[in-house]
């Protein structure tokens, strides 16, 4: 008869053996081990360093129609707040609105020709026109509405004049208007990258790669054939999100549907090629999923989905600009909310095209029609 102590001892040995095996297996799986270290490190850096709700250096334009010393003093006073950073000096309000629609600036300060008279009578001296689609940026600009003019204009020591603030594209400041278009970028990144990141790995694990080895198919042909079925899936997902967002949350669709479809198509192909690159690196579907999460976290946190890029430090902005999600976030919000055209968004569109072409080339180069 086996004693209880002996049974516990042998159970301990079996548990120890399994634990030791798992540790050795994990140590040999370099990608998984790297993810164990990198995922919490990246999250710590993103949340502690890059994510900041204190918006500063918002890109704005100045339309000073007064051409007066008072106007120049007011502009300098606005700069001193460090809330905004003057990027452009324009001559008309129409030019400022076009720049906001393109995404070149987030707001514009318009000072009228009668600025001096308005100061003398303590009237509203100017107007901020703001891209209201981003509620955090709109809130930061609204803080300047009550900017005190005392000691700003020398001859107006007791001025009570203020600025008007006009919010474009989302005057009610509803968060759903900003979130729903951005959600398209996040969901497409998650699904498209995940689908294709396991594509080659799945063929290897199921033994189908042996069949591909015996065929005359070229690596680039294989890459293109892998992504084509998922393009339709991505367009269906975009239609569901935007359609329900329009019906349930009254999210406006101000832009052209054809421009919306083309912009989404370019982002889908860019995301799919990113997944293909991952699939040529990962050895198992678990590794592919881990690497997808590694890509998804910066896309959610750095693309402008949660906090605007203007609130991030310079290094985080560089990383954000390398992600397809950041460019598509600007494209989808500009088309859906502002009615922008693809011609106005050509920089982001060209970047998505370039990323897709380079990504396909890299994936094809990395893929070898060998079992190992």
Image (cartoon, rainbow, N blue to C red):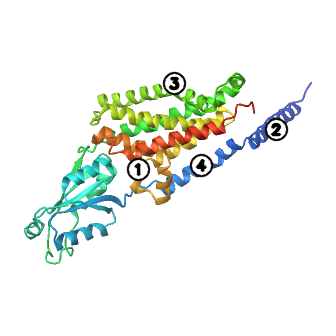
Provide residue 318's location: percent of width, then percent of height: 49, 55
* Disc with the residue nearer the chain's start (3 vs 4): 4
Q: Is label 3 in contact with label 2 (beta carbons under 8 Å)?
A: no
Secondary structure of the residue carrying numbered label 1: loop
Using the numbered discs, state the Cα–Cα distance from disc 3 to disc 2 in whole angstroms.
46 Å
Q: Which residue is mark 2?
A: 16
Q: Residue furthest front?
A: 216
Residue 40's disc number: 4
Q: Are marks 2 and 1 in contact (CB under 8 Å)?
A: no
- Residue closer to the observer: 214 or 334: 214
Q: Are marks 3 and 1 in contact (CB under 8 Å)?
A: no
Read off the residue under disc 1: 307
The mark lying in front, picked from 4 and 1, is: 1
List x then y, in percent, for residue 177: 31, 39
Determine whether, in the image, residue 265 is placed left or right of residue 41: left
| Res 251 → quadrant | top left
Q: Which mark is nearer the camera, 3 or 2?
A: 3
Query: Position of 41 compared to 156: left or right?
Result: right
């Amino acid at each position: 008869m086996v004693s209880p102590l002996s049974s516990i001892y042998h159970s301990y040995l079996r548990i120890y053996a399994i634990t030791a095996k798992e540790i050795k297996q994990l140590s040999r799986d370099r990608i998984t081990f790297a993810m164990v270290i990198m995922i919490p490190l990246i999250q710590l850096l993103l949340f502690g360093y890059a994510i900041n709700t204190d918006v500063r250096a918002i890109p704005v334009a100045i339309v000073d129609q007064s051409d007066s010393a008072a106007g120049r003093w007011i502009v300098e006073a606005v700069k001193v707040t460090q809330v905004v950073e003057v990027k452009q000096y324009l001559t008309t309000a129409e030019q400022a609105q076009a720049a906001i629609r393109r995404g070149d600036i987030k707001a514009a300060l318009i000072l009228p020709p009668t600025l001096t008279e308005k100061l003398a009578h303590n009237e509203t001296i100017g107007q901020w026109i703001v891209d209201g689609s981003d509620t955090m940026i709109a809130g930061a600009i609204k803080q300047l509405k009550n900017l005190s003019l005392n000691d700003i204009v020398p001859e107006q020591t007791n001025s009570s004049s203020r600025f008007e603030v006009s919010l474009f594209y989302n005057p009610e400041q509803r968060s759903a208007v900003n979130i729903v278009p951005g959600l398209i970028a996040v969901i497409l990144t998650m699904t498209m990258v995940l689908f294709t990141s396991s594509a080659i790995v799945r063929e290897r694990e199921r033994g189908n790669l042996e069949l591909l080895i015996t065929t005359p198919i070229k690596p680039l042909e294989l890459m293109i054939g892998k992504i084509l079925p998922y393009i339709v899936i991505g367009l269906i997902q975009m239609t569901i999100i935007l359609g329900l967002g329009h019906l349930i949350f009254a999210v406006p669709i101000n832009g052209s549907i054809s421009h919306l479809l083309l912009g989404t198509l370019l982002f889908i192909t860019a995301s799919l090629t990113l997944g293909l690159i991952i699939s040529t690196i990962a050895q198992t579907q678990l590794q592919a999923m881990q690497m997808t999460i590694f890509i998804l976290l910066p896309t959610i946190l750095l693309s402008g989905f949660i906090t605007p890029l203007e609130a991030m430090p310079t290094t985080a902005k560089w990383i954000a600009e390398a992600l397809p999600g950041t460019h598509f976030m600007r494209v989808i919000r500009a088309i859906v909310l502002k009615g922008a055209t693809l011609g106005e968004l050509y920089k982001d569109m060209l970047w998505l095209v370039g990323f897709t072409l380079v990504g396909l080339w890299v994936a094809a180069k990395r893929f070898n029609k060998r079992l190992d």
